[in-house]
Image: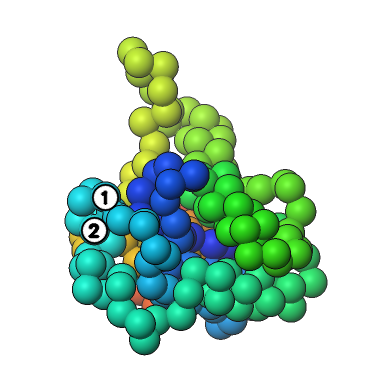
Amino acid sequence: MLIVVDIETTGLDLERDQIVSIGAVNFAKPQQTYYNECRLSRRVRPTEEALHVTGFSLKDLTSRRRPTEGEIVRQFLDWGKKSRMRMLAGENPWFDAAFLRRASKKYGIVWPFGHRLVDLHSVSYSMLLRLKECAIIPKRKSPLSLDKTLKFVGLEPRKTFHNALGDAKLEAEALSRLIYGKSLLDEYSKYGVPSYLKRR
């Protein structure tokens, strides 16, 4: 089944920035999760926006007590290899996969996942189209964000800093509601699944 993954990085530049945390959920066995944070590599400095979004401080990210980027990438890939089906999923998973694939190559780690990805945005957008809820907008760009999808599936939009595991759980929960019309994780069961998503 799917591995729903979310990463936080020091910025958006694949060549200049790096991963600072990885969170993941095994979609078939959602009690199986992965989470870790790492320290900055030399000469890598986070953007102010990245610090604002994640809530990490420069002191956090430079702590020698944290593992290296290579160590947490290896741990995550080893964790992911235990899944019977190795397909990554998430909100805009191309971003996460690109950083993870680049890091695996940098540290000489074999990439265990296939090249196919499941994008929560696409699943959500297709459901909106099916329900005739998706309006054409002037800029010709999708109006959907993760928070809008969360609201659409009956969940609370995020109100705090982005956390890789927290976001991976929300993305897995949203995928379950969109695909199966039911909740996946006990912590979100208090939020009812909208009737228009329930399978008849």
Of 53 and 108, which appears nearest the observer? 108
Of 84 and 175, which appears nearest the observer? 84
Of 22 and 135, which appears nearest the observer? 22
Of 108 and 78, which appears nearest the observer? 108
Q: Amino acid at mark 2?
A: Leu
User: Looking at the image, which residue sits at the far front?
Assistant: 43
Q: Is residue 48 left or right of residue 96?
A: left
User: Looking at the image, which residue sits at the far top?
Assistant: 138
Helix, strand or loop at label 2? It is helix
Q: Is residue 41 left or right of residue 182?
A: left
- State the residue position of label 1: 47
Which residue is at a point 28% across and 61% down the rendered structure image? 54
Above or below — where is 162 with respect to 78?
Answer: above
Residue 132, given in percent of the width and then of the height, sits at 47, 28
Other-residue count near label 2 (Cα within 10 Å), few / some / many at <14 / 14–19 / ≥20: some
Which residue is at a point 26% across and 50% down the rendered structure image? 47
Do callouts 1 and 2 mark residues in contact (Cβ within 8 Å)? yes
Can you tell which quarter of the image residue 87 is in? Answer: bottom right
Q: Is residue 46 visible?
A: yes
How far is mark 1 from mark 2, CA to CA? Answer: 7 Å
Q: Is residue 166 visible?
A: no
Mark linked to residue 51: 2
Colour scheme of this structure image?
rainbow
Which residue is at a point 74% across and 78% down the rendered structure image? 82
Residue 85, given in percent of the width and then of the height, sits at 77, 65
Q: Is residue 142 left or right of residue 3?
A: left
Residue 58, given in percent of the width and then of the height, sits at 23, 67
